[in-house]
Image (cartoon, rainbow, N blue to C red):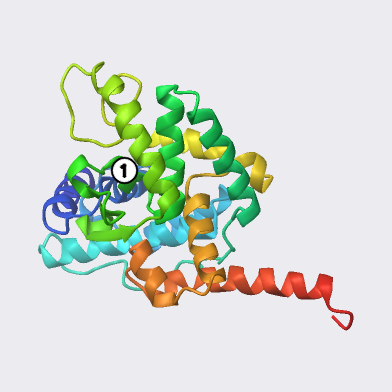
Amino acid sequence: MRLSSAAEAFAAHLQHVRRLSPATIRAYAADLRDLERLVGDVPLRDIDLEKLRDWLWQATQRGDARATLARRAASVRSFFSWAKEEEHIGVDPSLRLVAPKRGRTLPTIASQDGMRTLLDSRRAEAAQGDVISLRDHAILELLYASGARVSELCGIDIDDLDQDRATVRVRGKGAKERVVPFGIPARDAIAAYLSRARPALIARAAVPTPAVFLGARGGRVGPRTVYTLVANALGPIVGADAVGPHALRHSAATHLLDGGADLRAVQEILGHASLGTTQIYTHVSSERLTATYRLAHPRA
């Protein structure tokens, strides 16, 4: 079997058997296409360890980040492991492939005062009655209140909301569901959006949708729209030009821990499979505490 056809079969395996998210499948596919650009559409048995090492070396020469190199190595290891199990190859050439360890950088977060100022200003804008302002305020409140990923927020349907209990069911990575609580400000913003804005937006749709959050044409809002909204809102607060929606998720997690939340509870809220992923936020809280100590203590 040649590389291109094997990559297509592998993508189908990831979708239908392992049930990975579309974004993860696209990342695997992109890495395998990049490998094909180097080695060509050759039979799998012609790809050996040296070719894989050369592929990673060229990515290093392009200046790819260590996290990117680690992801590429993980992609081909998963791919060739599958190919070995399917008996497309006799020997897995990726077993001894080593990539640099990921560098761990602390996430960008907004301060609690900054978030309060942002959400207060958005609430004032929404009070004017513009349907997009009402929607955007509800989105920002819910993202910050729940720590949900943007893809999870875009997938929320009306039936997923329980406004009486102030909870929302979201579908995370690997199609795993979890129920996340949110607070009174988010509940009020969502109620205002559902009563005053969503009916006007859905009237613009050619086909009605059960989605909670709608785009300007009445269809389910897309991740790019939410990305732009959050990036524009958070940029001035965190003082960065390139800030994505994950900064809002990072901020929610850090503020939960700052407020005394249990690490395991934060893991459940965020939907992390590993507690180690959640622990990065303890480092953020620790650094903030250390910075405050150095500024305030006379013997720091």
Q: Quick one: 277 or 210, which is closer to the camera?
A: 210
Residue that carries the numbered disc 1 in the rendered image: 40
Q: Secondary structure at mark 1?
A: loop
User: In x, y percent, where is residue 215?
Assistant: 33, 26
Q: Quick one: 33 or 18, which is closer to the camera?
A: 18
- Quadrant of the image for the C terminus? bottom right
Q: Amino acid at mark 1?
A: Gly
- For the point 38% across and 73% down, the residue is 265
Q: Can the viewer see residue 38 in this picture?
A: no
Q: Is residue 203 above or below residue 103?
A: above
User: In x, y percent, where is residue 90?
Assistant: 16, 68
* Residue 88, quarter of the rendered image: bottom left
- For the point 40% across and 23% down, the residue is 131
- For the point 45% across and 48% down, the residue is 185
Q: Can the viewer see residue 195 in this picture?
A: yes
Q: Is residue 36 left or right of residue 157?
A: right
Q: Is residue 162 above or below residue 217?
A: below
- For the point 41% across and 52% down, the residue is 184
User: In x, y percent, where is residue 96?
Assistant: 36, 73
* Residue 74, quarter of the rendered image: bottom left
* Residue 92, quarter of the rendered image: bottom left
